[in-house]
Image (spheres, helix red, strand yellow):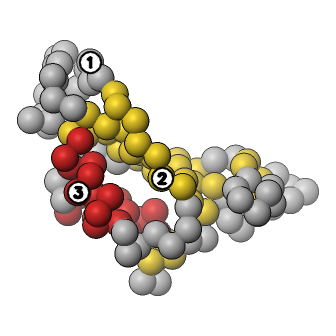
Amino acid sequence: MTNHTSEPTLRLRIYIGESSRHHHQPLYHAIVLKAREMGLAGITVMRAVEGFGPSSRIHAANLLSLSGDLPIVIEAVDLEERINALLEALEGMIDHGLITTDAVHVRRYGSSHTMS
């Protein structure tokens, strides 16, 4: 099923380290739980194989430099108001990382959940 929405939608990306924590649990998991609690359409956590942040220290997943802090990217697409509400809820959870948002056009979405 193809759905189109004319309402403003945003893609949220959160870049953190795998070792980041919130209340003794992985931060990425705490973010997923918060997004589900708030009724977002969905969220995905991706572990990167290599990257660096402000420290310029390379974090990589290979045998020669096995990092315990691989880059994590968390991504969600939803209505602008829902993404903004999630961002407000995350204010006290993320102490370092990078958060980006950009406008997207939703062209295709499953029939089980709508963004309206």
Say whether disc 1 or disc 3 marks the residue closer to the N-terminus. Answer: 3
Q: Is residue 112 visible?
A: no
* Residue 101, image x, y percentages: 41, 42
For label 1, the crowd category at 10 Å Cα-Cα, with few meaning under 14, some 14 to 19 and many 20 or more, is: few
SS type, badge 3: helix
Q: Which residue position is annotated with label 1?
A: 107
Q: Residue furthest right?
A: 64
Looking at the image, is 59 positioned above or below residue 89? above
Looking at the image, is 49 positioned above or below residue 7? below
Q: Relative to the observer, which residue lies in front, 100 or 114?
A: 100
Q: Which residue position is annotated with label 3?
A: 85
Separation (CA) of disc 2 from disc 3: 14 Å
Instruction: Identify the residue at horizontal 23%, vertical 41% (top origin).
Output: 80
Specify the amino acid type for callout 2.
Ile
SS type, badge 2: strand
Specify the amino acid type for callout 1.
Arg
* Residue 4, image x, y percentages: 17, 19
* Residue 107, image x, y percentages: 26, 18
Q: Is residue 90 left or right of residue 79?
A: right
- Residue 99, which numbered label? 2
Say whether disc 2 or disc 3 marks the residue closer to the N-terminus. Answer: 3
Q: Residue furthest bottom?
A: 24
* Residue 97, image x, y percentages: 56, 61
Instruction: Identify the residue at horizontal 71%, vertical 59% (top origin).
Output: 54
For label 2, the crowd category at 10 Å Cα-Cα, with few meaning under 14, some 14 to 19 and many 20 or more, is: some
Separation (CA) of disc 1 from disc 3: 23 Å
Q: Quadrant of the C terminus?
A: top left
Looking at the image, is 114 positioned above or below residue 39? above
Specify the amino acid type for callout 3.
Ala
Q: Is residue 106 left or right of residue 13?
A: left
Q: Relative to the observer, which residue lies in front, 52 or 101?
A: 101
- Residue 90, which numbered label? none
